[in-house]
Amino acid sequence: MSAPLIGITTRNTQSQTYDIPLVASPKSYIQALSRAGAIPVLIPLGSTPEATKQLLSRLDGIVFTGGGDIETQRFGGEDHAEVYDVDPERDAMELGLIHDVVDSETPFLGICRGAQVVNVAYGGSLYTHIADQHPDAVEHTFFPGHPWDHLAHPVQVTEGSKLADIVGKPILPVNSLHHQGIKELAANLEPVAHAPDGLIEALELPDYPFGLAVQWHPEWLPEDPYSLKLFDSFVAAASNGHK
C-alpha cells in the first residue's frame, strides 16, 4: 500500500539570505512524519480557501504545527507584552481548516500552537502568558542553556484516553516550549493530559478517527519511544482512511 499523504501547516517568514517572503515549516515535522512512514506535504499560506479544500481532499491526515501566538482578540484574551509573531493570515487559514478537517473526518494531530488552534477554533480560550496569569504555574517556556529536546516536566495522562492507549503509561516526561496555554477548554473537546500545575497538556476530539493535540513538541524527541509511538499511531490512522 502506498504511504499516506500528511499535510503540514506552514508559516510566513522572510529569507535572511535573499530578503524575500517565504512560506515554510521546520524540518523536524517532515523528519518525524517520514520516520513514521508518511509522505509530508506542505499546506501553503496564500492559497484561496477553495484551493486549500481541494488539497485537503487529497490528504490522509493533517498536522497543525507549532509557531507564533494566535491573535488575542480571536479568543477574548488579555493583551500582554509577551505576545509575539502574530500572523493573522495563518490564524484565519488554520482556524477555518480545522473545521474542514473535522467535517471530512480526516485524522489530525496538533502540536503546541496546533493544540491551541484546535481549542480556539471551537470556542475555547488561552492564557496569553502563563507565568503571569496561571496561579502556581511551573516553567513552560524555552529553557535557556538546554536543547529543545530537554524534558522539562512530566504530564499526567488520563486513563482510558486515546493518548493513554498510545503511550501505555500514566506519567510522561515532555519538553516544553510555550508561554501560552489552554485556559478554558472548548466544550466538544476532552482534556487527556495535565502538567503538575493543572495546565491542560493534551486534548482529544472524542468519537473521532484520530483527533489529538499535545502542547509539547514530540517532533523534537526523535529518540523518545513515546513520541515515536504518537507519530506511528497518527500515521497508521491516516493509512486506514487512505484516500
Image: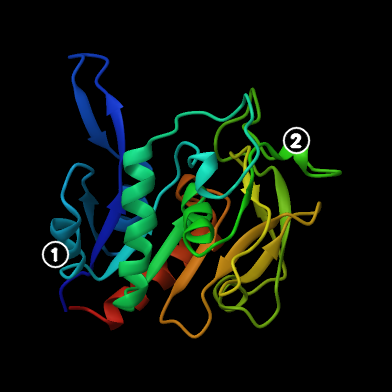
Instruction: Give the residue number, with chain letter if any, for mark 1.
Output: 54
Q: Is residue 95 visible?
A: yes
Location of residue 22 in the rendering, given as x and y in whole percent from the top left corner:
22, 29
188 vs 74, nearest the viewer: 74
Location of residue 26 in the rendering, given as x and y in whole percent from the top left corner:
35, 39
The answer to whether the residues at label 1 and label 2 have Cβ atoms under 8 Å apart is: no
Q: How many C-alpha atoms fall within 10 Å of the one at disc 1: few (<14), some, or many (≥20)?
A: few
Label 1 residue SS:
helix
Location of residue 104 in the rendering, given as x and y in whole percent from the top left corner:
29, 77
Q: Going 15% across and 60% down the picture, which residue do you hit?
A: 50
Q: Going 84% across and 44% down the picture, which residue do you hit?
A: 135
Mark 1 or mark 2: name the one nearer the start of the chain: 1
Label 2 residue SS:
helix
* Residue 128 higher or lower than 168, as above or below: above
Location of residue 68 in the rendering, given as x and y in whole percent from the top left corner:
46, 36
The amino acid marked with disc number 1 is Gln
* Residue 64 higher or lower than 132, as above or below: below
Judged left or right of residue 103, residue 149 is right
Quadrant the N terminus occupies:
bottom left
Q: Is residue 26 visible?
A: no
Mark-to-mark CA distance, 1 and 2: 41 Å
Judged left or right of residue 214, residue 198 is right
Instruction: Give the residue number, with chain letter if any, for mark 2.
Output: 131
Q: Going 76% across and 40% down the picture, which residue do you hit?
A: 133
77 vs 189, nearest the viewer: 77
The part of the image, by quadrant, that contains residue 13 is top left
Q: Going 51% across and 62% down the picture, which residue do you hit?
A: 213
